[in-house]
Amino acid sequence: MRVVVVGGGIGGLALGAGLRRSGHEVVVFDRDTDVAATGGYHITLDERAQSALRRLVAPEVVRRLLASGSALRLRDRDLFWDYRGRVLGHGLDLSGSASIDVDRITLRTLLAEAVGADLHLGRAVSGVGVDDRGMPRVLFADAPPVTADLVVGADGTHSVVARHLAAGPTNRPAGIIGFSGRTSRADLTAAEQHRLGTRSSMAIGPRGAALYVGFLDPVGNAALDAPELSASITTGPTYIWGAMFPESARTDFLRDLHGTALRTALLDRFRDHRWAGHTLEVIARTDPGSVAAFRFNAASTRAADLAPWAAGRITALGDAVHATPPTAGMGAGAAIQDAADLLAQLDTVPDGGATVTDAIGRYEAQMRRRGGEVLSAAMSTVRLILATNTPLGALATAALCPVVAAATRLRRPPSRPVRAMSVSGPDATP
Ligand SMILES: Cc1cc2nc3c(=O)[nH]c(=O)nc-3n(C[C@H](O)[C@H](O)[C@H](O)COP(=O)(O)OP(=O)(O)OC[C@H]3O[C@@H](n4cnc5c(N)ncnc54)[C@H](O)[C@@H]3O)c2cc1C
C-alpha cells in the first residue's frame, strides 16, 4: 500500500518508520527544513507509548531512545508547591514506573533516522482532495499533487488534513497561555538546587498562575545505562520549566516578546501575583534564548466528538485529531499509539481481506477512545488552574495554601526509593 503522511512530527515519523518497516511504500512530508531545528523541551513516554514504539521501530532505535531518556523511577518523588514555596503534597510513587522523559528534538531526530530517505523536508502541504479515480492526494502550492492509497494527516494542532475532514477546526484555545524555558541545574544557587532537588514539581498560586518545573537528566538518570548509544542533546541535569497564565487581553503582549524581554516580563507577572522570590530563580537564571511562548489548544474531551467524519482513505492522528495541552504529558505518547494502532489495522488489509475503509474505521474508534482519555487527564489540570482565577478561587487558594502546607508539614514525607543509578532496571530493556 502506498501511504502519504502529512507531517513529520512525533506521530507522523513514528507511523512512517512503522510503515517502512512493515514493507509499505511511504512518503512523509514536513514543512520544516531541519528536524533538529524545531522547538520543544521534554516529552514523556509512558509504558504504553514505549510498547507502541517497539511495534514501530527496530529494537536498536528503542535502545538508543532509552539510552537518551531520563528515567522517572530514578528521580526524587515529585512535589506540589504553593506560590510562596510551601510544600502542599507529594506526587505518586514512581519507583516502579517505566516512563521516561526525552528531549523532543532527540526523539524526533531518532524517528527521522528510522524513516530515512522517505522523509521529505521543506514540503508544506496546502490541501488534500481526491483525483479523477477517487484516490486521495495531497496538494502543494509550489509542486504537482501526490496521489496515494491512503493519506494520513499527522500535521498537528492546526492540521490542514483534519480541518478538511471535519470541515472546520478540530480544537480551540484552552484558555491558558504557556511559556517554557530550559535552565541548567548548575546555574541555580545551592539552596534552590536543594529545594527543587532531582524531581519534577508543580506550583500554583491565585489568579491562575502556575509553574511546572520538570527535571531532565538523560546522563545521570539514563533509562538504559549505555552512554555509547545516547543521542541526547541534553548533556547534564536540567530543569525544563513551564509557566502558565489564563489567556486574556492582559497576556496578549507577552506573545510578542522574546528572550530576555520575555523572561523579565514573566518574572514581573509572577511578582505581581505575590510569588516568593526564590520560587522564581529557575526562570531568572534560565537561558534567555530558550524562553518561548505557546498557546494551549484542546480538542473535546468527549471521545464521540473526535474525528467527526466517516472513515475513508483520508484519516488523521495525534494532535491533528485530539490536540492535547501538555499538562498531562501525554500528547506525544498518544500520537505514537495512534500510529501503532493504524499500522496494525493496515496490516490486516491484505491477509484478512478487510477493506481499507473498514481498517480505518476500526483504527479511528481506537483513536477516539484514547483521545478522550488523554484530553480528560490534561484538561483536569487546565480546569484546576483556571478555577484559581475566579474571585472565589483566588480567595480559596490564598486561604487554603497555608493550611494545606501546615498539614503536609505534620505528615511524615514519603521516603525516597533507593536505587542504583548506574544499573538499568528490567523495564529499561526493550
Ligand atoms: C515545536 C513543537 C514543540 C513542542 N514541544 C513540546 C514539549 O516540550 N513538551 C510536550 O509535551 N509537547 C510538546 N509539543 C507537542 C508534542 O510534540 C505533540 O503533542 C505531539 O508530538 C503530538 O504529535 P503529532 O505528531 O500529532 O504532532 P506534532 O509533533 O506537533 O507534529 C506535527 C508536524 O506537522 C508538521 N506540519 C504542520 N502543518 C504542515 C503542513 N501543512 N505541511 C507539512 N507539514 C506540516 C509540523 O511541522 C510538525 O512537524 C511540541 C510540539 C511542537 C510542534
Image (cartoon, helix red, strand yellow):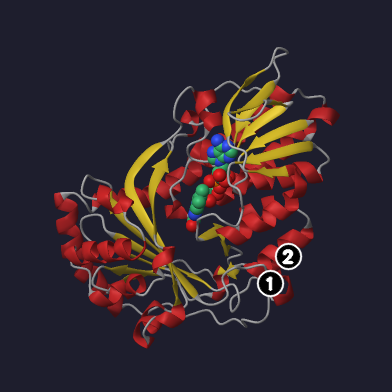
Q: Quadrant of residue 139?
A: top right
Residue 235 shows in this picture: yes
Of residue 5 and residue 392, the one placed in the foreground of this image is 5
Q: Residues within 10 Å of mark 2 (few under 14, many from 20)?
A: many
- Image quadrant occupied by the C terminus: bottom right
Residue 187 located left or right of residue 125? left
Side (left or right) of 342 relative to 414: right
- Secondary element type, mark 1: loop
Neighbours of disc 1 within 10 Å: few (<14), some (14-19), many (20+): many
Q: Which residue sits at x=18%, y=67%?
A: 274
| Mark-to-mark CA distance, 2 and 1 | 7 Å
Is 95 on the left-hand or right-hand side of 424?
left
Callout 2–callout 1 Cβ contact below 8 Å: yes
Whether residue 226 is visible to the viewer of this picture, yes or no, is no
The N terminus: image quadrant: top right
| Helix, strand or loop for disc 2 | helix
Q: Which residue is mark 1?
A: 224
Pinpoint residue 178: horizontal percent, then vertical percent: 36, 54
Q: What residue sits 67% from the left and 47% below the top?
A: 14
Which tag, 2 or 1, sits closer to the chain's start?
2
Q: Which mark is residue 63?
A: 2
Q: Position of residue 41 (x, y in %)?
A: 50, 61
